[in-house]
Image (cartoon, helix red, strand yellow):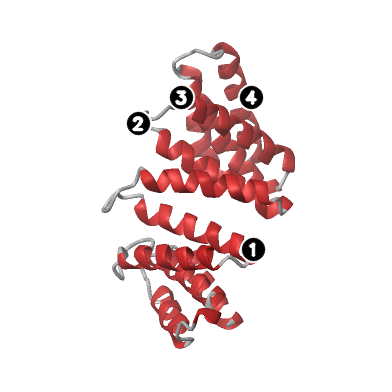
Amino acid sequence: ILLNNFANGLAKQYDLSGSLRVLEEMFWIYRECLGLCPPGHPIRDGLLSNFANGLSKQYGRLGSSSDLEEMTRMLKESLELRPHGHPFRMSSLNNLGNSLSRQYARSGSLGDLEGAIDKYRETLELCPLLHPHRVGSLNNLSEALGKRYDHSGSQDDIKKSVRLARESMGLCHPDHPDHAWASLVLARSIRRSMALQIRPGEIFQVLKGGLMARMSPLERRLGCGLLWIEV
């Protein structure tokens, strides 16, 4: 437990410094922890999840496919150790969905995308109305269904994508921290579904709201601006 806490502290240090040396030391400690916590150990699921989070950071920096593959493997094992009713099952489902989505972005494999959709669906089922993570779950599933629509042309997928994005948007007041993200997801869904007779002007209205969402992260607001230019 002490080693795990030390590794978690290094993860925070990396967030502040961006030092790859700190990240490497963190991985060494996590591997030591896993060696001391074999299958059946009560904190193995948390160690796997924390290790995978560190690999996610490194993948974001270096883009190594081996990091992504190891991260996905660890998240799958962690999820298996968190059955239905486990307090952290929802976060494991969401993290694995994100990892599979990143694998899809890299490989283009529909199997990865289908896996991400399954995990996002189950995550959403665990986020009832007014749950603090419902907006993010709606956004993730909407985006994944939109990507599958790009492959299949399924009207069912794009209609569900738009419906989920509209629900997310409805849960985000202008000062909600995810307002720009919800705006971006809805705008992308509308753009995909122009053939469904949705008013073209709506996409600009949605993006304008995202651009003005002052409590949202700058990168989300910039995403709205870039999509505005593309449209």
Mark 4 crowd level (few <14, some 14–19, many ≥20, 10 Å Cα) = few
Which of the numbered marks, if any, corresponds to residue 152? 1
Which x, y percent locates residue 225? 52, 77
Residue 114 vs 35, above or below: the answer is below
Which secondary structure lies at badge 3?
helix
Identify residue type, mark 4. Trp
Residue that numbered label 3 is attached to: 5
Image quarter where the N terminus lies is top left
At label 3, the amino acid type is Asn
CA distance for labels 3 and 4: 13 Å
For discs 3 and 2, the disc positioned in front in the rendered view: 2
Q: Which residue type carries mark 1?
A: Ser
Residue 23 in the image, given as x and y percentages of width and height: 61, 35
Report the front residue among 143 and 198. Answer: 198
Which type of secondary structure does the marked residue at label 1 adopt?
A: helix
Residue 87, label in figure: 2
Q: CA distance from mark 2 to mark 4?
A: 28 Å
Q: Earlier in the sequence, mark 3 or mark 4?
A: 3
Q: Earlier in the sequence, mark 4 or mark 1?
A: 4
Quadrant in the rendering for residue 126: top left
* Helix, strand or loop under label 2: loop
Q: Label 4: which residue?
A: 28
- Residue at the spot x=51%, y=42% of the render? 95
For marks 2 and 1, give the one nearer the viewer: 1
Q: Is residue 6 visible?
A: no
